[in-house]
Structures are given as structure tokens and as C-alpha cells.
Amino acid sequence: MKRDFGLDALLNLDGFESHYANGCWYKIEARLVEPTVERPHGIRYNLTFHDNFGARIFGIDNKHVPKNKRRGFHGRIVNYDHIHKDKNDKGTPYAFVDAEKLLTDFRERVDRILSELEA
């Protein structure tokens, strides 16, 4: 099995919050769990980015079965990994590769959203 070099970083960020001058903030939750069909990588995570009122703008998680029935979620849902692309998205499939990519994907989207808000 390939070693996930970002796993320690992700787990060390459990409970971490970062706040920006514009009032936006993000929170990271991550912990090891027994691997299951729903979480085959053995990590339960929830990375969320919020506006200055506390409403989620964006997130990536596998805390629950996605509620979105759009493309990619036909039939029985097995894998819980999904992304909330905006505040209205109930969950779109997310292809979990490893913890390092998860953190990179999250930070890139947060940075892009912050740039758009500043424009």
C-alpha cells in the first residue's frame, strides 16, 4: 500500500480553524476510523469554508451519505467522499486520492474563492 505522506498533516490539523480579515473562516476535522466500504481509506474528514455569517460556502467531507442525486450518485451510494461546490450543493462525488491531495484541493478552492470575493 502506498504511504500517504499527507496523513499526519491532516490528522494534526483536526480541530484547526483559520479566520480571515473579511470574516470568512475554515475548519478542519479529521480522524482515523476503521476502514469500511463507505470510508475505505480509514479517514473520517470534514473540511469546510464559511462566510462571515458562518454559512458554509464550500466543503469536502465524508461524514455522511451525500444527499445529491445528480450525476455520479445513481443507485446505491457506497463511498461517502463528496464535495459541496457551493452553499446549495448537497454533495457531488469527490475522488479521494490521499490526504495530501485532499488538503491541496481544499486550499486551492479556498484561495480561489477568497480571490473572487476580493475582486
Image (cartoon, grey):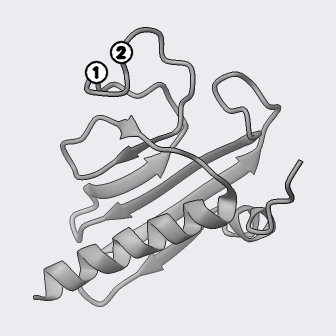
Q: Residue at x 34, y 25 (%)?
A: 67
Residue 105 location in percent, x, y? 48, 65
Q: Residue at x 36, y 27 (%)?
A: 72
Question: Mark 2 = which residue?
Answer: 74
Circle 1: is it few (<14), some (14-19), or many (20+) Cα within 10 Å? few
**Whether label 2 touches label 1, CB < 8 Å:** yes
Q: Mark 2 or mark 1, which has the lower sequence index? A: 1
Above or below for 21 versus 79: below
Q: Is residue 63 visible?
A: yes
Question: Mark 1 = which residue?
Answer: 69
Q: Residue at x 25, y 73 (%)?
A: 113
Above or below for 32 versus 13: above
Q: Closer to the observer: label 2 or label 1?
A: 2
- Mark 1 element type: loop
Above or below for 11 versus 33: below
Circle 2: is it few (<14), some (14-19), or many (20+) Cα within 10 Å? few
- Quarter of the rendering containing residue 12: bottom right
- Mark 2 element type: loop
Q: Is residue 23 visible?
A: no
Furthest residue to the front?
Answer: 2
Q: Residue at x 10, y 88 (%)?
A: 119
Residue 62 location in percent, x, y? 54, 38
Residue 68 location in percent, x, y? 29, 27
